[in-house]
Image (spheres, coloured by chain):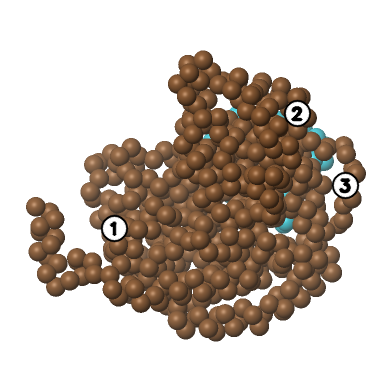
Chain colours: A cyan, B brown
């Protein structure tokens, strides 16, 4: 259950940062991505998947707790 | 000597690793890599920010060095107490040459050493009382100080002193910020965790001090320079460029910085990060809490300066963008003259670097502007995200080494035969005795500034002065003389 810092980069893509692991990745896809419902499975560009409880879209940048689903390759 | 191919470099790494016992060889192999620009992520090729192997000569520092020496130390109007035995503070005193304006001992304290000088009885009975007394004394002797930070040395954590309680009490008594920093040297694997702890202390004890206070008049062009420690005047050389393009520099973190500047930083519009490794934590925090965006920039060498100025300007309106072009045009004749003078003397020379948090990648551009080539680079305490940023800067098939050991570094140098090495004071004399020109790239070998256009002129002069110094022809190393084989046999016997 790492703490993940989320922000939007200049291209409007979601950037995923896990301080403890120096992991800085762009999110490839977000399962739910609308103002009312945001979250679900997030796939990063390195192939790993994280899960956020679906919630109203937060105000980025923000730190949220995520669940790690798999480590990718 | 021609550049090594990828296979040759890989073979070199294997050869150097051979001397280690199996376990150590396995571990060290993960920290040495051949650069491959096609890689997106460094974790595919290199491991970093891991504990150094016992028995190898690492070049790293400790958490106290990261906090007191790097982040907190340069804040000039605060008194930083090295809390613990006297040595840590004394032997690191003023060594980093963080320049500042002020009268030392009156309203600035950068080069002074304040310590609680722990004795046996303080270890046995605890040092809290002594610490409280020190702060009362400081208030009486140096009434113009603007705050105190308590930089813990190892014993504080070991004996479990409650410095936070002492700090809170002292804060009430003297009415100035008192910041306890838990940066005991044994924490973490290198000085890197010290930076993080120091950033967190700033976040918890300083940054919020002026929340809800809007008396500070702001402009749309307010920026903060973060992670510039003013070594040899670096921050000043950077600051002039930013101001000339029309920005207002509200705060300098932390070279020539003050605590008031830090407290005002949450009011700025943009944070500019020079040393990403040591201060990205606070920038990320401010981004989240105060919605202040941040960008990294690089003020080494005209190519990177122009790139950075334009990148910064792009986040502001047209007046700033025009300002950036004006600044670049203004200094063009100056830096072109520098390149015209020194490039012919330095063209094609090869450099190996091994420094701290930002320079292994930041100075590459400056060397390239002078026609030089960086053939090996590495960080003492970089993390994966540093190497991510390095891969693109370095040429293919060049060496990358993380937390290099004394032995590895020497062997690499013997084989790669660079014309110049840039590293720290501990490496300097080894390589000079080997007859290789050396620049101390932590504190610019008592020169500087190297940032900005003004700094580039000094950088170019220094590199030329070192590389083309006739003294290197006078150095006779045993392995270069005719009967070197005999010497080697004798040494081996």
Q: Chain of mark 3?
A: B
Considering only vertical position in the picture, is B123 above or below B30? above
User: According to the image, label 3 marks what residue?
Assistant: B216
User: According to the image, label 2 marks what residue?
Assistant: B174
Q: Chain of mark 2?
A: B
Report whether A39 appears left or right of B337: right
In the current view of this chain or complex, which residue is farthest to the front? B141
Report whether B75 appears left or right of B437: right
| Percent position of residue B248, x then y | 80, 59
Q: Of the residues tagged 3 and 1, which is closer to the observer?
A: 3
State whether discs 3 and 2 lie on one chain: yes
Secondary structure state at the residue bearing disc 3: loop
Q: Residues within 10 Å of mark 3 (few under 14, many from 20)?
A: few
Report which quarter residue B317 is drawn in: bottom right
State whether discs 3 and 1 lie on one chain: yes
Q: Chain of mark 1?
A: B
Considering only vertical position in the picture, is A56 above or below B445? above
Question: Is disc 3 in contact with disc 2, using a CB cutoff of under 8 Å?
Answer: no
Q: Earlier in the sequence, mark 3 or mark 2?
A: 2
Between B252 and B383, which is closer to the camera in this rendering? B252
| Percent position of residue B421, x then y | 40, 64
Q: Is residue B384 visible?
A: no
Q: Earlier in the sequence, mark 1 or mark 2?
A: 2
Q: Earlier in the sequence, mark 3 or mark 1?
A: 3
Disc sitting over residue B411 in the figure: 1
Considering only vertical position in the picture, is B166 above or below B151? above
Report which quarter residue B58 is drawn in: top left
Secondary structure state at the residue bearing disc 1: helix
Quarter of the picture holding the N terminus of chain B: bottom left
| Percent position of residue B309, x then y | 70, 67
């Amino acid at each position: 259950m790492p703490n993940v810092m989320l922000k939007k980069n200049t291209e409007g893509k979601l950037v995923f940062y896990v301080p403890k692991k120096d992991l800085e990745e762009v999110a490839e896809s977000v399962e739910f991505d609308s103002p009312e419902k945001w979250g679900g499975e997030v796939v990063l560009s390195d192939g790993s998947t994280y899960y956020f409880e679906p919630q109203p879209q937060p105000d980025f940048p923000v730190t949220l707790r995520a669940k790690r689903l798999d480590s990718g390759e | 000597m021609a550049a090594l191919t990828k296979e040759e470099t890989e073979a070199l790494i294997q050869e150097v690793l051979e001397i280690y016992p199996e376990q150590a060889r396995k571990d060290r192999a993960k920290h040495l890599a051949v650069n491959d620009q096609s890689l997106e992520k460094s974790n595919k090729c290199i491991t970093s920010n891991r504990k150094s192997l016992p028995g190898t000569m690492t070049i790293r520092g400790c958490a106290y060095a990261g906090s007191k020496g790097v982040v907190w130390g340069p804040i000039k109007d605060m008194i930083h107490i090295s809390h613990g035995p006297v040595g840590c503070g004394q032997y690191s005193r003023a060594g980093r040459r963080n320049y500042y304006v002020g009268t030392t001992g009156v309203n600035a304290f950068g080069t002074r050493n304040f310590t609680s000088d722990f004795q046996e009885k303080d270890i046995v009975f605890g040092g809290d009382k002594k610490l409280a007394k020190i702060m009362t004394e400081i208030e009486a002797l140096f009434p113009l100080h603007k705050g105190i930070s308590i930089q813990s040395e190892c014993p504080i954590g070991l004996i479990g002193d409650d410095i936070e309680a002492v700090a809170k009490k002292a804060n009430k008594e003297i009415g100035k910020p008192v910041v306890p920093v838990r940066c005991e040297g044994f924490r973490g694997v290198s000085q890197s965790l010290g930076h993080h702890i120091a950033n967190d202390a700033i976040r918890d004890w300083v940054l919020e001090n002026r929340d809800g206070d809007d008396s500070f008049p702001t402009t749309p062009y307010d920026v903060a320079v973060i992670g510039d420690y003013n070594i040899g005047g670096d921050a000043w050389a950077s600051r002039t460029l930013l101001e000339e393009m029309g920005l207002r520099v509200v705060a300098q973190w932390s070279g020539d910085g003050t605590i008031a500047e830090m407290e005002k930083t949450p009011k700025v519009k943009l944070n500019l990060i020079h040393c990403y490794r040591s201060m990205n934590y606070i920038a990320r925090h401010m981004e989240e809490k105060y919605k202040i965006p941040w960008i990294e920039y690089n003020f080494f060498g005209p190519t990177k300066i122009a790139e950075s100025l334009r990148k910064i300007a792009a986040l502001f309106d047209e007046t700033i963008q025009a300002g950036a072009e004006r600044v670049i045009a203004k200094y063009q004749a100056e830096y072109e003259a520098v390149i015209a003078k020194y490039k012919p003397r330095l063209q094609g020379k090869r450099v190996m670097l091994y420094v701290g948090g930002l320079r292994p990648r930041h100075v590459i551009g400056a060397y390239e502007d002078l026609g030089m080539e960086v053939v090996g680079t590495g960080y003492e305490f970089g993390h994966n995200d540093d190497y991510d940023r390095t891969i693109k800067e370095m040429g293919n098939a060049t060496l990358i080494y993380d937390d290099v050991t004394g032995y590895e570094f020497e062997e690499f140098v013997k084989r790669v035969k660079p014309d110049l090495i840039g590293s720290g004071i501990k490496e300097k004399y080894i390589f000079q005795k080997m007859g290789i020109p050396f620049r101390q790239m932590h504190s610019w070998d008592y020169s500087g500034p190297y940032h900005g256009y003004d700094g580039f002129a000094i950088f170019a002069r220094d590199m030329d002065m070192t590389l083309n110094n006739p003294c290197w022809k006078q150095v006779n190393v045993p392995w270069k003389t005719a009967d070197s084989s005999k010497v080697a046999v004798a040494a081996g016997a």
